[in-house]
């Protein structure tokens, strides 16, 4: 398993960014073992949570061994607390970075499959939010979405106040991320509206895997979205189990 750190220029963010990439092409082959077939790799674009960066998944889980065993390329960018969305007001285009720049660069640089069914997007917490909104927004690119303890917080964002004790829960912070909050519902940042739009247009909806710990503070929000997906006939795999909003849970469930 090769772990590669790469710097490249993102047109959407207008700067050089750093990513980690797991490439499972150097697996040792001992006498009597079959050599793995050389073909374009399936790819998982895996997003971290708030306060994190491109190193989180490698340091917090057994992801490297899991990717090696499955012959899966894993690409891990940084989201910089921006929830992986576009905000024209601040000229931050993290959605385009994920759905366009990152996919284009990694496919051009590594031997990756360009098939929709071989291209996945996933993440935890803030990254789970980024995975669902960009997985739906770029549904022609991603065939599967993976949401672990997803930050499905639109109701919290809309009800936010300027004086919340937590800086990343304050209305000013959310406005810096999402822009005009009065326009949030029904936008390309709204995980319900995006799904309904795909259904209305008759476009393919990615398969979705969703999980959350039963002691997680986001459990109720995830259950509500699970029910919404089921009501709309989405191909959904839901799992839950004992666990909080922590790496113990995510390490267990990313391996499933």
Image (tube, grey):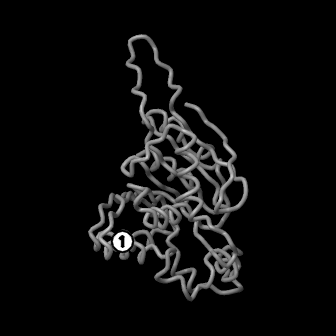
Res 47 quadrant in image: bottom right
Residue positioned most to the top: 31
Instruction: Report x, y in % for residue 239.
Output: 37, 57
| Nearest to the observer: residue 74 or residue 99 | 99
- Tell me the quarter of the picture where residue 183 sits: bottom right
Residue 85: x, y in percent?
Answer: 58, 69
Name the secondary structure under disc 1: helix
Question: Residue at image x 42%, y 59%?
Answer: 211
Name the residue: 36% across, 68% down: 226
- For the N terminus, which image quadrant? top right
From the top left corner, tell me how far across and down residue 14 is, in percent. Answer: 71, 61
Residue 170 lies, with reference to residue 134, above or below; the image says: below
Q: Is residue 94 above or below residue 40?
A: below
Instruction: Give coordinates of residue 248: x percent, y percent.
Output: 53, 50
Give the side of residue 58 with respect to residue 142, left or right.
Answer: right
The residue lying toward the viewer, choosing from 214 and 125, is 125
Q: Name the residue that disc number 1 marks.
A: 198
Q: Is residue 37 left or right of residue 151?
A: left
* Residue in the image at 54% along x and 40% along y: 62
What residue is at 59 percent from the left and 42 percent from the top? 21
């Amino acid at each position: 398993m090769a772990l590669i750190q790469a710097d490249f220029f993102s047109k959407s963010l207008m700067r050089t960014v750093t990513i980690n990439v797991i490439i499972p092409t150097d697996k040792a082959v001992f006498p009597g073992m079959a050599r793995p077939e050389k073909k374009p790799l399936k790819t998982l674009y895996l997003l971290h949570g708030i306060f994190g960066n491109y190193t989180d998944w490698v340091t917090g889980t057994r992801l490297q061994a899991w990717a090696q065993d499955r012959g899966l390329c894993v690409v891990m960018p940084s989201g910089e607390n921006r929830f992986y969305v576009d905000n024209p007001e601040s000229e931050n285009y993290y959605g385009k970075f994920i759905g366009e720049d990152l996919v284009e660069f990694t496919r051009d640089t590594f031997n990756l499959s360009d098939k929709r069914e071989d291209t996945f997007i996933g993440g935890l917490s803030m990254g789970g939010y980024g995975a669902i909104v960009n997985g739906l927004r770029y549904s022609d690119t991603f065939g599967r979405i993976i949401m672990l303890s997803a930050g499905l917080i639109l109701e919290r964002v809309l009800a936010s106040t300027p004086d919340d004790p937590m800086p990343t829960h304050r209305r000013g912070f959310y406005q810096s991320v999402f822009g005009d909050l009065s326009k949030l519902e029904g936008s390309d940042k709204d995980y319900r509206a995006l799904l309904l739009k795909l259904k209305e247009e008759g476009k393919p909806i990615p398969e979705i895997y969703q999980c959350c710990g039963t002691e997680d503070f986001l459990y109720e929000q995830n259950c509500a979205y699970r029910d919404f997906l089921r009501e709309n006939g989405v191909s959904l795999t839901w799992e839950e189990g004992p666990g909080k909003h922590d790496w113990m849970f995510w390490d267990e469930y990313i391996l499933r």
